[in-house]
Image (cartoon, rainbow, N blue to C red):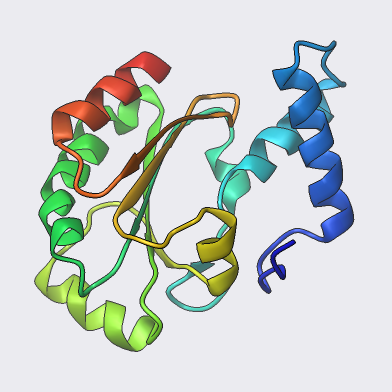
């Protein structure tokens, strides 16, 4: 099992969330609404804000969430930014959230100057080695699409066209 990041949920609750999600995926009767909300929240990658504090992924509950793992040195990642900016602008009102998680080892010192040259109009945070292992991020970019229940419905690896991501989002809306 990967070592939890500082921002990760405690192992006991992660195991409980995994069991709840596995039960729901298997078609078993769902738990109480509060547990379902917790399970949905637990499905999102846990990351840090650029300032270092843990991001509030609970705020993503009930939304279609597009998570893009990227890095400043990754040319295909940079090519995807305008599409994510458009997606954020055009679909935020319909409950779609876009989140960019930078996987640069140098962290905020590298990411902040990069964002001045390549503005991202959606929330950006910092990833961790634990996320690399948890989501198998051997190559970037990787984009995950979650439906409103917090279930991952699509994984894109490498450069992905705006049309492909948009089709997955529309499927989830």
Between residues 60 and 46, which one lies in front from this camera angle? 46
Q: Residue at horizontal 36%, vertical 77%? A: 104
Residue 54 in sight from this viewpoint: no
Q: In the image, residue 49 lies at what x, y percent?
A: 48, 68
Q: Quadrant of residue 31?
A: top right
Q: Residue at horizontal 60%, vertical 68%? A: 130
Q: Quadrant of residue 94?
A: top left
Q: Residue at horizontal 33%, vertical 25%? A: 169
- Figure check: 20 above or below 102: above
Relative placement, left or right, of 30 versus 49 is right
Q: In the image, residue 64 lies at what x, y percent?
A: 44, 29
Relative placement, left or right, of 121 versus 60 is left
- Figure check: 36 above or below 87: above
- Figure check: 114 above or below 102: below
Residue 163 in sight from this viewpoint: yes
Between residues 123 and 72, which one lies in front from this camera angle? 72
Image quarter in which the C terminus is found? top left
Q: Quadrant of residue 69?
A: bottom left
Q: Residue at horizontal 29%, vertical 78%? A: 111
Q: In the image, residue 90 lies at what x, y percent?
A: 20, 30
Image quarter in which the N terminus is found? bottom right
Q: In the image, residue 147 lies at what x, y percent?
A: 49, 25
Relative placement, left or right, of 70 versus 35 is left
- Figure check: 35 above or below 79: above
């Amino acid at each position: 099992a990967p070592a939890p990041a500082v921002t990760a949920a405690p192992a006991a609750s992660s195991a409980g969330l995994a069991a709840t999600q596995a039960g729901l995926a298997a078609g078993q009767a769902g738990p109480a609404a509060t547990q379902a909300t917790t399970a949905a929240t637990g499905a999102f990658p846990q990351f840090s804000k650029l300032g270092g504090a843990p991001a509030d992924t609970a705020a993503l509950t009930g939304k279609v969430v597009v998570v893009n793992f990227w890095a400043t040195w990754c040319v295909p990642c940079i090519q995807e930014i305008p599409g994510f900016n458009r997606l954020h602008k055009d679909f935020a009102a319909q409950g779609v959230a876009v989140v960019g998680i930078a996987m640069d080892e140098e962290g905020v010192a590298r990411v902040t100057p990069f964002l001045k040259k390549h503005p991202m109009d959606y929330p950006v945070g910092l990833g961790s080695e634990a996320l690399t292992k948890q989501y198998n991020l051997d190559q970037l970019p990787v984009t995950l699409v979650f439906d409103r229940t917090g279930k991952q419905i699509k994984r894109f690896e490498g450069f992905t066209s705006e049309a492909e991501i948009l089709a997955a989002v529309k499927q989830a809306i």
